[in-house]
Image (tube, rainbow, N blue to C red):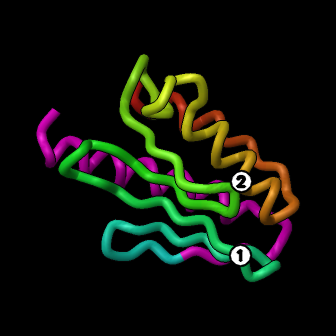
Amino acid sequence: MNEAQFQQQVDDLFLQVEELLDEAESDIDYVNTNGLLTISCENASQIILSRQPPLSQVWLACLTGGLHFEQQQGSWRLTTDQSQTLGQCLAQALQDQAQERFDCSALDGLLA
């Protein structure tokens, strides 16, 4: 995959996340700028998604730590052991920090 393809896939991913957040019941704000999608929760905590073009990865920063994802098996998967998808980890972070359940499973099929 070249960098232009990577950038387009991440743009599509971030757009999908924004659409999910627009359906939130709680007061969740987000800003998409300079390769970062910053999600601000009601409790003043943040979740940050960032693109890493040199590595072809997407990084997720949340209160529990930083996670790195790359394309594996048709979805964005943890680089450490591919055991979890970005959708699963983002849903957990949103539940932990925004106290709201989100179905982020659609994010896992974006590469299919």
Q: Is residue 42 above or below residue 90?
A: below
- The residue where tag 2 is placed is 93
Write the residue at 29% across / 54% down.
Answer: 52
Q: Which residues are magenta?
A: 1-30
Q: Viewer-proximal residue, 66 or 112?
A: 66
Q: Secondary structure at mark 2?
A: helix
Q: Find disc 1 in the rendering and name its residue.
A: 45
Reply yes or no: does residue 89 show up in magenta. no
* Mark 1 to mark 2 CA distance (whole Å): 11 Å
Residue 111 at x, y percent in the picture: 39, 29
Q: Amino acid at mark 2?
A: Ala
- What residue do we see at 45% from left, 44% from top? 68
Of residues 16 and 35, the one drawn nearer to the viewer in this rendering: 35
The image position of residue 85, as x and y in percent, is 57, 32
Give the number of marks: 2
- Report the residue at 44% width, 39% height from top: 69
Left or right placement of residue 41 versus residue 101 in this view: left
Asked whether disc 1 touches disc 2, contact meaning CB atoms under 8 Å apart, the reply is no
| Residue 19 located within the stretch drawn in magenta | yes
Of the numbered discs in the image, which one, if any, rests on residue 54?
none
The spot of residue 13 in percent (x, y) is 44, 48
Question: Relative to 41, is 109 on the left or the right?
Answer: left
Residue farthest to the bottom, as pictured: 44
Q: Earlier in the sequence, mark 1 or mark 2?
A: 1
Instruction: State the quadrant of the C terminus.
Output: top left
